[in-house]
Image (spheres, rainbow, N blue to C red):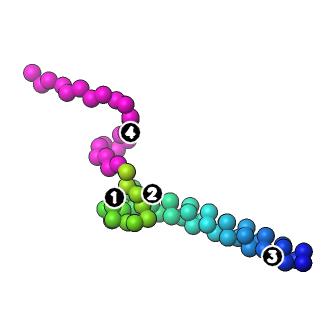
Amino acid sequence: MVGLVDVFAVGILILILALVVREVIFRWRVKLRVLSGDGTLLEDSRVKVINITQGPEGSHDVDAVRMVPVDES
């Protein structure tokens, strides 16, 4: 009976480890797709796109910053 419990424990640990590895690989691949500018990410059902921002490399998105138009007089 004790051997059966050990087998189940090892099985559950392998399942948890497999899920963690799968998630790490998925996030790594999404990051590579974002860096390469893959437009199909917008249509991928596994990815939720919240905000698309266009700007120069190194730009940061900052909340609660008020933008004031500059007069070019």
For mark 4, give the secondary structure. loop
Q: Which residue is mark 4?
A: 60
Distance between mark 2 and mark 3 Cα atoms? 36 Å
Please state the horizontal and vertical placement of residue 10, each as a whole percent of the image: 77, 71
Quarter the N terminus occupies: bottom right
Please state the horizontal and vertical placement of residue 17, each as a whole percent of the image: 67, 66
Residue neighbourhood size for the residue with mark 1, other residues' Cα within 10 Å, grouped as few (<14), some (14–19), many (≥20):
few
Q: Is residue 20 left or right of residue 57?
A: right
Q: Which residue is mark 2?
A: 31
Q: Which residue type carries mark 1?
A: Gly
Q: Which residue type carries mark 2?
A: Lys
Q: Is residue 19 left or right of residue 43?
A: right
Q: Residue furthest front?
A: 1
Q: Is residue 6 left or right of residue 39?
A: right
Which stretch is magenta?
Answer: 51-73
Query: Toward the viewer: 72 or 9?
Result: 9
Q: Residue furthest top?
A: 73
Distance between mark 4 and mark 3 Cα atoms? 49 Å
Q: Which residue is mark 1?
A: 37
Q: Which residue is mark 3?
A: 7
Please state the horizontal and vertical placement of residue 48, each as a whole percent of the image: 40, 57
For mark 3, give the secondary structure. helix
- Quarter location, residue 41: bottom left
Which is in the foreground here, disc 2 or disc 3? 3
Q: Which residue type carries mark 4?
A: His
Q: Earlier in the sequence, mark 4 or mark 3?
A: 3
Distance between mark 2 and mark 1 Cα atoms? 10 Å
